[in-house]
Structures are given as C-alpha cells and as structure tokens.
Image (cartoon, rainbow, N blue to C red):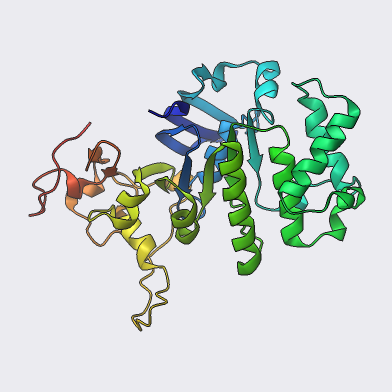
Amino acid sequence: MAEKLLEVHDLHISFQSKKEITPVVTGVDFSINQGETLGVVGESGAGKSVLGLSLMRLLPKDTAVIPNGRILYQDSDLLKMSDREIRKVRGSEIAMIFQDPMTSLNPVMTVGDQIIEALKYHNRRKLNKMQMEQRVDEVMELVGIPAYRKKEYPYQFSGGMRQRVVIAAALVCNPKLLIADEPTTALDVTIQAQVLEMIRQLQKKQGTSMILITHDLGVVARMCDKVAVMYAGEMVEQGRLEDIFAGSFHHPYTQGLFGSIPNLEGNSDRLKPIPGLMPPPNHLPEGCRFHPRCSHCMEICRTLAPSKHFCNDQHYIACHLFAGEKGGVSYWKRTI
C-alpha cells in the first residue's frame, strides 16, 4: 500500500480586514500518496490557489487566518511549525510552480543563478560549488534547456522556456511534493502539451507527488490519479480519476463543468455553460453554496448545507440529491 505523503483535515482559511472576516476555504479534506497526482479543479474564485499557498505557508500573515485544520506532511503538522522549521521544508521537501513565470523570475539575474540560489539555500547534501553547478546543468537538461543557456536572462527566453526554468528551479532540490498552480495557463496549446509531458516524465523519473491546480479538465484527465472539485471554497466532489470521468453519478457542479467542454467528435450541440457566477466569499448563500446556479435545486438546498455522501470508499459527493429518498431520487445512503 502506498505511503501517505500529505493529509489535510478540516482546513478553514479566512482573510480579515478592519471591517470583516471573509472565509475563502471551508472544511477541506484530502490526502495524497507518494508518487500520486491530485488534480484540484474549479472556476476562478473557488479557492484553489489559496489552498495551494496555504500548503506552502505562503499566505500573508497580516491578513490570512487559519482558525481550524491540520496539514500533515509525513505526520508533521505544517501549521504548527516555526518559521525556521517551515523554511527547511519549503523549497526542499515541498516546491511550487506558479502561473506566470515572469512574476517568479528575477529579470536582472541569470536563470542559472536563480536555479542555484534555491540549491544554496537548501544544500542538504553539502554540495560544493562545482557539484552545485553540475546539478544546475543536470536539471536544466532534464527540462529541455541546454546548459549553456544558464548565463542568459529571463527576457531572452520564450514563454514556454521561461516556464521550464521555473520548473527546473522547483525540481533542483528533488522535492517530494510539487504544487503546480495553473502551470501552463500562459502558454499556447502546443507548448502546453510539451510542458505537461515533460512534467509527467520528470515526475515518473523522480517519484515526485504532485497537486495540480487547474480549471482545465483535459489536463486533469491526462495527468492525475485523483480529482477534487472545488466550488466557493468547498470540495463538493472528490474521487479517483475513473470515478470522476467515467462514473455514473456526479455533483451538479461537476456535471456543469463537463457540459462546458467543447465536443470535438462532430456533435453540433451547443455548449451548456453553468448559469450565473461564482458567489463572492463575503456574500455566500445559505445552505448549499451552489444552489442559486443549480437546475436540480430543492427546498432543502436553500437552507441546509449538504453532507458528504459516499459512492465508494474514495468517491464522495456533497449534494442533497444523493442523501437517499429526496425529491423522488434514490442514491446512496452511506453518509458521514
């Protein structure tokens, strides 16, 4: 049985201002095993990126509040670590790839110096200068960048090559967990496919686990073992890839996401976008947060938040439709 690398239990995240405290992530639970990839999907504003930053302890200390929850990395709670302890984990054990490489790279430093900077800070293997240079050359070649280009600056690289530099910097310390936040959003389709394939091959070679944050279900189908669907700060459905993509039952929001994907098999049916917009965190509706946009909305949905209802031991759906006899619909009755 695969060993659990990361476990998140009942995580709540809010942002506070002088006037109010706004919840942005509510009651999130998930786990990821060694060598596994979890895809976190949902529309913009669902709380995906905030969740990723919280795992790295990169949320702003003056405004972000985590009133409840645990983030267990190899049985150690990241939320209870001191700043010094978390710095030893961040970058060396857990690394992150951000959406826009130009905001991650320093324009006045060569790409080689930026990659080696992380290695110097987390020099666990006590490498000397020559060994560190060799490691930089090695990781640049791994991501498809000729080592001689390490003396060049970010502006001398295309968008796809800059993203490869960011990936090289994230992988140079051989992290056990990689958090990739929309790693290919800024790239064209051809370069996107190349970068995704490169990440997958590197993951296999180094045995790295990954949390892939994206809105692209096609990317999830290609890259992930498990999928978590987020809406308005909550995980409304979670399961294995085959549960989400080939299963018979889904949360109405998950169904809406699939209905918004263009059909390339010659079907002329129009796309079926989800009506309405994601509610802002400071104006969340009562009951089920998706009910104002849901075509299956029942009276109970307007007042009571749904529990998690399990289809199997790894696939759950947080929806009143699956709570037994509701509105003539009979599904699963095993709940927590």
Quarter holding the C terminus? top left
Residue 168 horizontal side relative to residue 8, left or right: right
Quarter holding the N terminus? top left
Q: Percent position (x, y) of residue 12? A: 45, 31
The image quarter containing residue 246 is bottom left
Residue 89 horizontal side relative to residue 26, left or right: right
- Give the residue drawn at x 45%, y 30%: 11
293 versus 4 height, above or below? below
Q: Percent position (x, y) of residue 82? A: 65, 15
- Give the residue drawn at x 58%, y 43%: 203
- Foreground residue, 288 or 216? 216
- Give the residue drawn at x 35%, y 45%: 240
Residue 146 horizontal side relative to residue 230, left or right: right
- Foreground residue, 320 or 282? 320
The image quarter containing residue 83 is top right
- Give the residue drawn at x 56%, y 39%: 52
